[in-house]
Image (cartoon, rainbow, N blue to C red):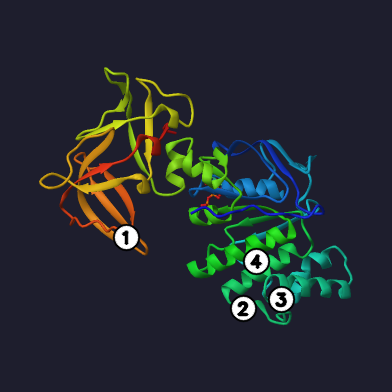
Amino acid sequence: MFTDKSRSRGADAPGAGLSLEGIAKHYGSVRAVDDVSLTIEPGQFVTLLGASGSGKTTLLRVIAGFLEPSAGRVLIDGRDVTSVPVHRRNIGMVFQSYALFPHLSVARNIAFPLAMRGMRKAERRALVTQALESVHLPGYEDRMPAQLSGGQRQRVALARAIVSRPSLLLMDEPLGALDRRLREVLQVEILKLSRELGLTVVNVTHDQEEAFTMSDRIALLADGKLVQYASPEEIYTRPVSDVAAGFLGESNLLRGVLTRTADGRLTLPAEDGHVEVDAATAVRAKPDAGDEVVVVVRPWSVGVERLGRDGAEPGGPCWLRGRLSAVIYAGDSQKLIVERPDGSEVVVRRSMDGQFEAEPGEEVLLTWSSRDAVVTTAG
Ligand SMILES: Nc1ncnc2c1ncn2[C@@H]1O[C@H](COP(=O)(O)OP(=O)(O)OP(=O)(O)O)[C@@H](O)[C@H]1O
């Protein structure tokens, strides 16, 4: 499920290192970005991920220099650029709306940043040709933007963003307007290109799959705050909170206050169930009786069996009873929705081999290993 993002990059990689130190941006009483600090290594691909209004675009605009932060510093390769204007930051940018000049040809659109720098025409032409080749649109120099598909326009926008060899590429939902298939093709292309050029990339998205496939690290934002900054794998397996768990991949969140059994085991009270907790799976402080926790159980970790008669009996360290309410076929996997007596739902994922035979409406037993769950907290 996880992609290998290891790579080798030449010593002459142009990617810049980026540091954000205590960045805040306030609009009156709205804290669009609230004390965000993070470091991006040269050549890393980092995604700002979060719900609508979480502050992604605001943070990107602060990095770009379109917005001055209310507090904090932006450092590129260790240099404080907080007050340096956009055009002096050596940054390439791609936005969701294509932002191409409609009255200029593809070549002139791409050459625009070079012309602004006063580069001569012949020199510009060579770089434009090269940039078009790297985005797989060779020979498109004379087309007008209106004669291009949505995907081609984003390729041209990307060519324009990289033509002046920036050390940092900023992208704000560049694939948001494209259909799923094209998005997946371009995700791979953009990633490949950024690796080849050794670019440091900051990408904004609210698409968790895109964040998962493309990023070395994900900066998860909620209400302007940095919730977690880690690799996709780490956020998936060790989410620091229920918010983080809910953002990356499906999850079942069991909430409650821990109690300790007579023989010393930690449990989470559950109606028609028994949930033991392995303190070793805690992401933060070691949990104890009286702590309010959220236990994250991923759908792939849950086993399901028919209950009673010739089926299974409740028992073991982690089990819940429920009623199967839906069986959904999702390509090579099966998704089961199980309704609990308290009205909540548990999602179970299974591979298609070894199909589950019960019908919706049947009573089922859900089991998992406490080692496969993660103990985290709300917030
Ligand atoms: N110019 C502004 N004036 C006042 N409030 C603003 C302004 N720009 C953004 N905000 C507020 O700041 C918060 C963060 O907005 P931002 O656009 O950064 O979020 P986002 O995560 O990029 O959202 P989306 O995914 O919807 O683009 C929101 O509450 C938004 O309403």
Determine if the C-beta at disc 2 is less than 8 A from ligand 1: no
Residue 66 appears anywhere in the view: no
Locate residue 76: give its quadrant.
top right
**Label 4: how many Cα within 10 Å (few below 14, some 14–19, many 20+):** few
Q: Residue at x 82, y 54 (%)?
A: 12
Q: Secondary structure at mark 3?
A: helix
For the point 67% across and 46% down, which residue is it? 62
Q: Say which label, 3 or 4, has the lower sequence index.
A: 4
> Disc 3 marks which amino acid?
Val
Q: CA distance from mark 1 to mark 3?
A: 50 Å
For the residues labelled 2 and 1, the Cα–Cα distance comes to 44 Å
Dots 2, 3 in contact, CB < 8 A: yes
Q: Which mark is residue 66?
A: none
Locate the C terminus by quadrant. Answer: top left
Left or right of residue 6: residue 315: left
Vertical arrangement, residue 140 with respect to residue 287, above or below: below
Eye-nearest disc, 1 or 4: 1
**Nearer to us: label 1 or label 3:** 1
Question: The residue tagged with tag 1: helix, strand or loop?
Answer: loop
* Pointer 3 residue: 106
The mark lying in front, picked from 2 and 1, is: 1
| Separation of marks 2 and 3 at Cα, in angstroms | 9 Å
Residue at the image position 31 percent from the left and 55 percent from the top? 335
Q: Which residue is mark 4?
A: 99
Q: Which residue is mark 2?
A: 148
Label 3, label 4: how far apart the Cα atoms are? 12 Å
Q: In whole angstroms, how far apart are the C-alphas of marks 1 and 4? A: 48 Å
- Name the secondary structure under disc 2: loop
Is residue 88 visible in the rendered image? The answer is: yes
CA gap, disc 4 and disc 2:
13 Å
Q: Is residue 334 left or right of residue 325?
A: right
The residue that label 1 is drawn on is: 353
